[in-house]
Image: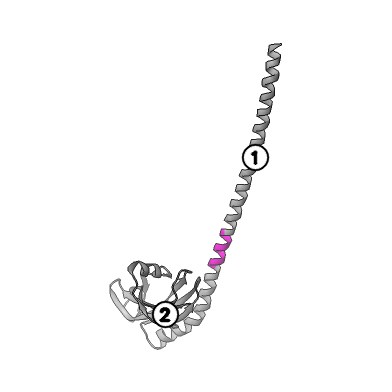
Amino acid sequence: MIVTIIYILFGDVRYKMVKINKKAAIGLSINTLVVVIISLVILGSGITMLYKFIGGAEDIKGQLDSKTNEELERLLVNQGERVALPLNSITIPKDEGHVFGMGILNIAEKADFNIVVGLSKFINSNDEIVDIKPNEETEILDWLLYNDEPTTIAENEHHKESIMVNVPNTAVDGRYIFKAQVFMNGAESYGNIQKFYVIVK
């Protein structure tokens, strides 16, 4: 009799516990499934945005190359300029970018050439020259994307490089004057220093 009562009491409790555990397991499974689905959606969106960004950058580069190639050919081949950076001024809205074309003509023996770009000065929207602190200059130079590694150019051959400028949303309005310098064999300055102008509005 006592055993029966105990079984009824504790058996009912055990049944309820099993029922609760099943509900908890089902709830946990649903939560896990929701998290997995959300993660996959975020991952898919990220990949899509990445491909759009890469595709957009390639489109911009292609359009600009078609505009600058002819001018670079004229300056390097026809006029014999050792270093050229045509179409060197552009107004860029915030969160947008632009690609400048730079060309190098090697009139010496086969050598390695590399480009170094720095900030020459910043003029604010009131036409005042503003002193830029070293950390601010570093942030501005982070806008630039270009190949700063040495490139081998044969004698009497020319080479073209792209300098991409991406203006962030945090940029201060004004005119940013950059200077691009070419070095031969890592030490000797080659050709004239070229300047290009980025107007942010």
Compared across the picture, whether 200 is left or right of 120 comes to right
Q: Would you name the residue on which mark 2 appears?
A: 197
Q: Camera-side residue: 137 or 79? A: 137
Compared across the picture, whether 25 is left or right of 131 comes to right
Q: Position of residue 79 (x, y in %)?
A: 39, 88
Position of residue 118 relative to residue 17, above or below, is below
Determine the secondary structure under disc 1: helix
Dividing the picture into quadrants, the one containing residue 196 is bottom left
Q: Amino acid at mark 1?
A: Gly
Q: Residue at x 28, y 72 (%)?
A: 187
Q: Residue at x 70, y 15 (%)?
A: 5
Query: Nearer the viewer's eye, disc 1 or disc 2?
Result: 1
Q: Position of residue 46 (x, y in %)?
A: 56, 59
Q: Which residues are magenta?
A: 46-54
Compute the Cα span from label 1 to label 2: 60 Å
Dividing the picture into quadrants, the one containing residue 77 is bottom left
Q: Camera-side residue: 18 or 131? A: 131
Q: Residue at x 69, y 17 (%)?
A: 7
The magenta stretch spans residue 100: no
Q: Amino acid at mark 2?
A: Tyr
Image mark for residue 27:
1
> Magenta stretch: dominant SS?
helix
Which residue is most to the left? 187
Mark 1–mark 2 CB contact (< 8 Å): no
